[in-house]
């Protein structure tokens, strides 16, 4: 595999061993990390303490924005509160997730899969396109009632052929 020219500074393991502070100075001067190579392969990236803390802070902010608790418009019966909490922690409002991954999460929580055929997301996307929702049925019954999870989502504006969904709302319905 041919290496691409990087737009960031590089160093070698030998240079790091000789003078790690020079590599940190290189990162500070460039305002970015320094790729450290070992035998023509990237072994890691060196950052200054400030750069690392800035990245952690930015990551925390992004996670806080993306993983807001799922708002539900319908009240949840007390016996389903545990399931509702599991849904809220697994499927976050505002999150972008592939239809395949959403289906796998729902199956892991005990819902019946929506996938059909090879690849499987066609049925999910068709239902979402027709109704604006994907409705899953829980495998078990509670008090002789069937439990449904109603997921309102939008197809994310990505290149054609992708199956990314933006989660808008998740409701638990008991019938």
Image (cartoon, helix red, strand yellow):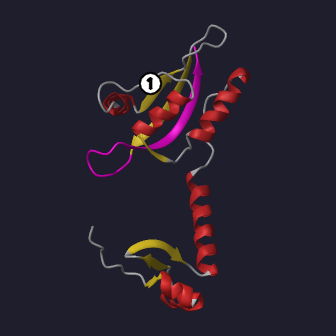
Residue 67 to residue 119: above or below: below
| Residue 171 colored in magenta in the image | yes
Q: Quadrant of the N terminus?
A: bottom left
Side of 145 relative to 31 (left or right)? right
Q: State the SS at label 1.
A: loop
| Front-lying residue, 166 or 2 | 2
Question: Residue pushed farthest right?
Answer: 78
Side of 172 relative to 36 (left or right)? right
Which residue does the image show at 56% across and 79% down from the upper left? 47
Using the rendered image of the protein, determine whether residue 71 is visible from the camera's viewpoint: no
- Is the residue marked by circle 1 packed among few (<14), some (14-19), or many (20+) residues within 10 Å? some
| Label tally | 1
| Residue 11 colored in magenta in the image | no
Residue 61 in the image: state x and y as whole percent. 61, 63
Side of 9 relative to 94 (left or right)? left
Which residue does the image show at 44% across and 76% down from the upper left? 38
Side of 26 relative to 42 (left or right)? right
- The magenta segment is 156-175
Q: Quadrant of the C terminus?
A: top right
Q: Which residue is mark 1?
A: 113
| Front-lying residue, 50 or 143 | 50
Residue 79 to residue 169: above or below: above
| Front-lying residue, 169 or 39 | 39
Residue 16 in the image: state x and y as whole percent. 53, 85
Residue 95 in the image: state x and y as whole percent. 51, 48
């Amino acid at each position: 595999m041919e290496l691409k020219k990087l737009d960031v500074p590089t160093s070698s393991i030998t240079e790091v061993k000789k003078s790690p502070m020079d590599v940190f100075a290189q990162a500070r001067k460039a305002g970015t990390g320094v790729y450290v190579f070992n035998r023509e392969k990237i072994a890691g990236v060196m950052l200054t303490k400030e750069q690392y803390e800035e990245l952690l802070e930015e990551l925390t902010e992004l996670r806080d924005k993306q993983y807001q608790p799922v708002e539900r418009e319908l009240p949840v019966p007390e016996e389903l509160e545990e399931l509702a909490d599991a849904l809220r922690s697994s499927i976050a409002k505002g999150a972008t997730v592939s239809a395949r991954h959403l289906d796998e999460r729902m199956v892991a929580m005990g819902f019946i899969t929506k996938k059909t055929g090879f690849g499987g997301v066609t049925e999910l996307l068709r239902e979402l396109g027709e109704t604006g929702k994907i409705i899953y049925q829980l495998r078990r019954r509670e008090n002789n009632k069937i439990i449904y999870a109603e997921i309102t989502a939008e197809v994310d504006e990505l290149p054609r052929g992708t199956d990314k969904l933006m989660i808008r709302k998740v409701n638990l319905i008991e019938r």
